[in-house]
Image (spheres, rainbow, N blue to C red):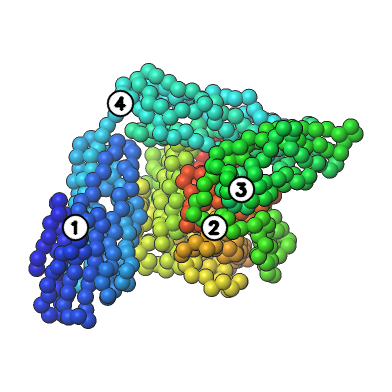
């Protein structure tokens, strides 16, 4: 055997038990274990130095550090296992066993989470089938401490009730450093219908403060909530809970949020203008002296359409519109709006028309479809075309939620214990849940006993979670649970957004298969987590921007159709399927209580009834994953609103004083 060492790491090659003498060749970081010409294993490790270093402040995770192994040979091999030590180095994503055909890679990512100041050394180790000695990558982390202490006031803002179409008076937020060392503000963000103004990313010395304003735009007769998140370079994020309620307009007013959905250079655009407090029909026009960016026009019906001229640069374009109703005398309202224009993301933004001309039948959000049907499948989130959870099922869910209490590691009541919400899904759910954890942990309304377990993992399809021996379950049990400070006995709820890896394009058979996977996942959750009582589903958001993108995932109409798989799985439980029973009074418990969480899908720039759209700027270049931060924040806001308002989640998600 020959061993090669690089900056504290090593790779060692051992012969296969069944092979004849071999040679070991080192070439540009690629390690070739060669025997007979018919049996070769060749792989490349990245980073080539076999050493990973990171630094972070105590209580704050470092940036993710990737590690990969690529099969550069002609025969498949398996990464059979891996390990990470000590506990300050944590798995961000990755799993084993995984078999790698030629040209394929296994990817892992590590984060450093220091518990004290100083240098911590460790290692990431992986074993490969047929190779005796493991591949070892050295890990070095430097923990830092700070005496900075940012204080945000107030911790909540309630804008009260405003007629639709009006903007609140601004309220002031102040961030003050009451500690003994400087702290840098790295991000200040919130979501519509709340708007920031005057926010600056500054470094605050001890005793210094910075202030900014927040306003609420009343766009609908409903209560809106969000979290304003302030992130720092050296300490955990802070949050402010935001609330505002829209009430019916008393006079004609434009009800759009003042910043319209983003347009993309050279791409088709669609935005529907809306008004409240109107009498009769509406007539829209550009206000005197105001223009839209070249290529766009406003119709009398209040729809902005067209394709942005290539000369239009990225930026914000303010303009003013007027709307007149049919009252006697007619009322007129004028307002200034802003159209943000972004550069092409790489997604297929410039080959889509609104409405999409080639999609038949037209895709209508399930929540808007109601008792209508799509290829014979009735709409609505629940039976009968309804979007409201059936009363008896809702009552059961409320009863279960009210029974959730803090638990110790063995699952027994402990007033000082914890309980956990687990995520499941693929890389899209992974991205969303990372953002969700940041926002939820920053929210002063969150229950202090609640812990989040990021079980969603890149490459994890629904079929993977549907089998009990999947390595993704092992990653949850061996890494994500202990890293989150909880046991399997303390997991009480799960959220899932996932799909099948290779749909055939046939409806409803694809969705029937996905439905079956969902039901098996529910059963597996009951098996692995004995106190998991509640399970919430979200289907995929719009996937139309992935057409024409290399290796697209979840293209339309598949992303849309995934909502039916969720509906049918829940419907099976509602219909009393024994394999999904959650009520011990009706027989053996086989699964958690199941429900929709938030419904994500909207047809791109065509607004659904509540106004939700997905712009190309919300999606990454691959046409699939949410952009960071815009797309992630949009989806996370939907998720946060659900968990903070649903009657089956508020008893355990919110702090007692916030319910």
Dot 2 lies on which element?
A: loop
Whether tag 2 and tag 4 are in contact, CB under 8 A, the answer is no
Q: Nearer the viewer, residue 349 or 214?
A: 349
Q: Are marks 1 and 3 in contact (CB under 8 Å)?
A: no
| Label located before the other in sequence (1 or 2) | 1
Determine whether, in the image, residue 649 is placed left or right of residue 479. right
Q: Compare residues 572 and 214 and report the one nearer the observer.
A: 214
Nearest the viewer among 253 and 86 is 253
Left or right: 483 in relation to 531: left
Q: Which residue is mark 1?
A: 136
Which element type, helix, strand or loop, lies under badge 1? strand
Which of discs 2 and 4 lies nearer the camera? The answer is: 2
Disc 1 crowd rating (10 Å Cα; few below 14, some 14-19, many 20+) is many
| Location of residue 306 in the rendering, given as x and y in whole percent from the top left corner | 67, 50
On the image, the x and y values in percent for residue 469 come to 37, 68
Quadrant into which the C terminus falls: top right
The residue that appears at 24% across and 63% down in the rendered structure is: 44
Q: CA distance from mark 3 to mark 2?
A: 17 Å
Q: Label 3: which residue?
A: 309
Q: Are marks 1 and 2 in contact (CB under 8 Å)?
A: no
- C-alpha separation, residue under disc 4 versus residue under disc 1: 36 Å
Q: Which residue is mark 2?
A: 348
Residue 147 image label: 4
Q: Nearer the viewer, mark 1 or mark 3?
A: 3
Q: Secondary structure at mark 3?
A: loop
Q: Earlier in the sequence, mark 4 or mark 3?
A: 4
* Residue 217: quadrant of the picture: top right
Per the image, label 4 sits on a secondary structure element best described as loop
């Amino acid at each position: 055997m020959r061993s090669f060492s690089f900056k504290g790491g090593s790779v060692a090659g051992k012969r296969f038990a069944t092979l004849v003498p071999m040679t070991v060749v080192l070439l540009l970081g690629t390690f070739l274990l060669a025997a007979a010409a018919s049996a070769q294993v060749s792989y490349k490790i990245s980073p080539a130095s076999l050493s990973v270093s990171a630094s972070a402040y105590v209580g704050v995770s470092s940036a993710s550090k990737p590690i990969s192994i690529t099969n550069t040979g002609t025969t498949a091999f398996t990464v059979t296992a891996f390990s990470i030590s000590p506990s300050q180095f944590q798995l961000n994503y990755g799993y084993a066993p995984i078999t790698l055909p030629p040209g394929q890679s296994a990817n892992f990512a590590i984060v450093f989470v220091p518990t004290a100041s100083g240098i911590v050394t460790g290692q990431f180790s992986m074993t490969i089938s047929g190779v005796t000695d493991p591949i070892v990558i050295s890990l070095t982390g430097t923990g830092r401490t700070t005496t900075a202490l940012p204080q945000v006031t107030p911790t909540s803002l309630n804008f009260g009730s405003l007629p639709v179409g009006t903007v609140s008076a601004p309220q002031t937020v102040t961030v003050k450093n009451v500690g003994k060392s400087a702290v840098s503000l790295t991000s200040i963000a919130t979501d519509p219908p709340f708007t920031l103004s005057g926010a600056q990313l500054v470094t605050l010395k001890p005793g210094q403060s910075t202030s900014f304003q927040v306003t609420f735009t009343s766009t609908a007769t409903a209560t809106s909530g969000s979290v304003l998140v302030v992130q720092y370079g050296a300490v955990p994020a802070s949050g402010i809970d935001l609330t505002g309620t829209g009430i019916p307009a008393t006079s004609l007013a434009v009800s759009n949020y003042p910043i319209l959905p983003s347009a993309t250079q050279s791409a088709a655009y669609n935005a529907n203008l809306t008004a409240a407090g109107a009498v009769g029909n509406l007539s829209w026009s550009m206000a005197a002296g105001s223009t839209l960016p070249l290529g766009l026009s406003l119709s009398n019906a209040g729809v902005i359409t067209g394709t942005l001229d290539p000369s239009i640069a990225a930026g914000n374009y303010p303009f003013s519109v007027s709307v007149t109703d049919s009252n006697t005398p007619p009322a007129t309202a004028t307002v200034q709006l802003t159209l943000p224009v972004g550069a092409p993301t790489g997604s297929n933004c410039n080959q889509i028309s609104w409405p999409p001309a080639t999609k038949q039948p037209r895709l209508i959000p399930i929540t808007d479809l109601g008792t209508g049907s799509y290829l014979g499948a009735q709409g609505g989130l629940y039976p009968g075309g309804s979007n409201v959870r059936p009363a008896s099922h809702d009552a059961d869910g409320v009863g279960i939620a009210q029974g959730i209490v803090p638990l110790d590691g063995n699952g027994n009541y402990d007033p000082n214990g914890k309980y956990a919400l687990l995520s499941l899904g693929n890389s899209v759910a992974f991205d969303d849940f990372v953002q969700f954890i940041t926002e939820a942990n920053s929210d002063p309304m969150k229950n202090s006993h609640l812990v989040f377990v990021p079980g969603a993992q890149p490459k994890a399809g629904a079929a993977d979670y549907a089998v009990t021996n999947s390595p993704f379950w092992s990653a949850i049990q061996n890494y994500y649970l202990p890293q989150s400070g909880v046991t399997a006995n303390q997991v009480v709820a799960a959220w899932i957004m996932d799909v099948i890896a290779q749909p055939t394009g046939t409806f409803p058979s694809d969705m029937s298969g996905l439905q079956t996977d969902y039901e098996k996942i529910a059963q597996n959750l009951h098996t692995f987590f004995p106190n998991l009582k509640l399970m919430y589903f979200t289907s995929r958001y719009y996937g139309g921007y992935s057409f024409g993108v290399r290796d697209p995932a979840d293209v339309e109409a598949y992303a849309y159709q995934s909502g039916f798989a969720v509906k049918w799985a829940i419907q099976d439980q509602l219909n009393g399927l024994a394999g999904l029973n959650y009520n011990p009074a009706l027989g053996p418990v086989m699964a958690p209580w199941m429900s929709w969480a938030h419904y994500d899908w909207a047809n791109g720039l065509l607004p659904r009834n509540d106004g939700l759209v997905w712009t190309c700027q919300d999606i990454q270049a691959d046409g699939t994953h949410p952009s960071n931060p815009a797309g992630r924040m949009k989806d996370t806001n939907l998720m946060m609103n659900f968990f903070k308002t649903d009657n089956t989640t508020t008893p355990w998600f919110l702090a007692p004083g916030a319910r």
